[in-house]
Image (cartoon, rainbow, N blue to C red):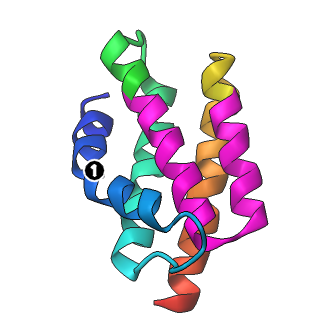
């Protein structure tokens, strides 16, 4: 989960941006779309290969779900918001398979937006 922890730390600027723009005033930049896609892919990959989840790993997964929801709200996309809600619910219920599936779907959808708009 080292890659996820480093990406989560680098995503603080994305988190700050998304939390300030979650009301739909401005959509994510191309760089932000790329970063959130990478973060979600890393979370899914790292969780899929993890043998043990530490407290720090769990906090990073929570942080990823928070970023995903804020980024989805900033985009104003109902499908992204629904998937981000699923990601958060998976984290709350500690369902690794559901978390991986939701993170993969979110990464795919953010990547589609990135490819279309950037």
Q: Tell me: residue 65, above or below residue 60.
A: below
Q: Tell me: residue 114, above or below residue 67.
A: below
Q: Is residue 95 visible?
A: no
Q: Is residue 117 left or right of residue 53?
A: right
Residue 64: x and y, percent?
Answer: 45, 41
SS of the residue at dot 1? helix
Residue 48: x and y, percent?
Answer: 51, 29
The front one of 27 and 55 is 27
Residue 57: x and y, percent?
Answer: 36, 21
Quarter location, residue 3: top left
Q: Is residue 74 visible?
A: yes
Q: Main secondary structure of the magenta part?
A: helix
Quarter location, residue 50: top left
Q: Residue at x 67, y 71 (%)?
A: 76
The front one of 75 and 50 is 75
Q: Residues within 10 Å of mark 1 (few under 14, many from 20)?
A: few
Q: Residue at x 44, y 26 (%)?
A: 49
Within the magenta stretch, is there residue 69? Answer: yes
Instruction: Name the residue carrying label 1.
Output: 12
Quadrant in which the C terminus appears: bottom left
Within the magenta stretch, is there residue 75? Answer: yes
Q: Residue at x 53, y 55 (%)?
A: 70
Q: Is residue 27 left or right of residue 63?
A: right
Q: Residue at x 48, y 68 (%)?
A: 21
Q: Which residue occupies the extreme bottom position in the image?
A: 117
**Range of residues picked out in magenta:** 60-89
Residue 104: x and y, percent?
Answer: 60, 49
């Amino acid at each position: 989960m080292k890659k996820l922890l480093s990406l989560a730390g680098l995503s603080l600027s994305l988190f700050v941006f998304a939390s300030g723009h979650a009301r739909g005033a401005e959509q994510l930049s191309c760089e932000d779309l790329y970063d959130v896609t990478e973060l979600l892919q890393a979370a899914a990959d790292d969780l899929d290969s993890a043998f043990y989840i530490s407290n720090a790993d769990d906090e990073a997964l929570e942080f990823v779900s928070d970023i995903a929801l804020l980024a989805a709200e900033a985009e104003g996309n109902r499908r992204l918001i629904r998937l981000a809600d699923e990601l958060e619910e998976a984290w709350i219920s500690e369902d690794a398979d559901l978390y991986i599936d939701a993170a993969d779907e979110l990464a795919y959808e953010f990547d589609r937006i990135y490819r279309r708009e950037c």
